Amino acid sequence: MDTMDEREAFENAYSHYVHMVEALAGSPEEACKIYGHFNVAYGIKRDVELVPPIFEWAISPLTAEHRRGIANLISALQLIPEQVLSFTNVKQECLARMRHPSWLPARKMANQLLQDLRPITELNNRYFEQDARET
């Protein structure tokens, strides 16, 4: 069985994390579609808060500023009311919860974080494009 090297592990975790931040940054409709209308509010909050530990590895290109942006986004997510995060698998309830105004600051911060991470995301995309060409 092949094991991932540190670079591959980082690139995979980073790609997944950015995808979750994109779900948060996008419209409520996009977020619900990505999460399949299943417990969307709770799922996005949990996934964005669970920063991969490998972001702290020496191989990680994230700067102190990037880490502050992630920490600030997590702080904003802490302000989402519990009733907005309660379980539902009903499409209209998921949409209503993701449209709650408490998401607006976090959504704005997620968009800013994506902008700040753009150079790393571009390198990440090139990593996977190169990997696809080699296979």
Image (spheres, rainbow, N blue to C red):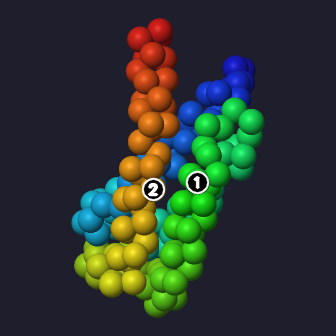
- In this rendered view, identify the residue nearer to me: 127 or 44: 127
Residue visible at 60% across and 60% down in the picture: 68
Q: Residue furthest top?
A: 134
- Position of residue 55 measured from the top left corner of the image (x, y, whole percent): 66, 45
Three-letter code for the amino acid on which mark 1 is drawn: Glu
Q: Above or below — where is 126 with respect to 63?
A: above
Tell me if mark 2 has few (under 14), some (14-19) or many (20+) residues whose alpha carbon lies within 10 angstroms of its own. Answer: many
Instruction: Residue 89: name its quadrant.
Output: bottom left
Label 1 and label 2: CA atoms lie apart by 10 Å
What residue is disc 1 on? 65
- In the rendered structure, which amino acid carries the disc numbered 2? Leu
- Image quadrant where residue 122 sits: top left
- Quarter of the image for the N terminus: give it: top right
Q: Residue at x 29, y 69 (%)?
A: 28
Is 101 above or below relative to 55?
A: below
Using the rendered view, name the quadrant where residue 10 is placed: top right
Number of numbered markers:
2
Res 91 label:
none
Q: Nearer the viewer, residue 69 or 9?
A: 69
Can residue 47 be spotted in the picture?
no
Local crowd size for mark 1, using a 10 Å CA cut-off: few (<14), some (14–19), many (≥20)? few
Residue for point 41% across, 21% down = 129
SS at mark 2? Answer: helix
Question: Sequence order check: which comes first, mark 1 or mark 2?
Answer: 1
Nearer to the camera, 36 or 95:
95
Q: Nearer the viewer, mark 1 or mark 2?
A: 1
Q: Which mark is residue 113?
A: 2
Q: Is residue 67 left or right of residue 109?
A: right
Residue 22 screen position, x and y as percent: 38, 54
Whether residue 28 is visible? yes
Q: Position of residue 103 (x, y in %)?
A: 38, 77
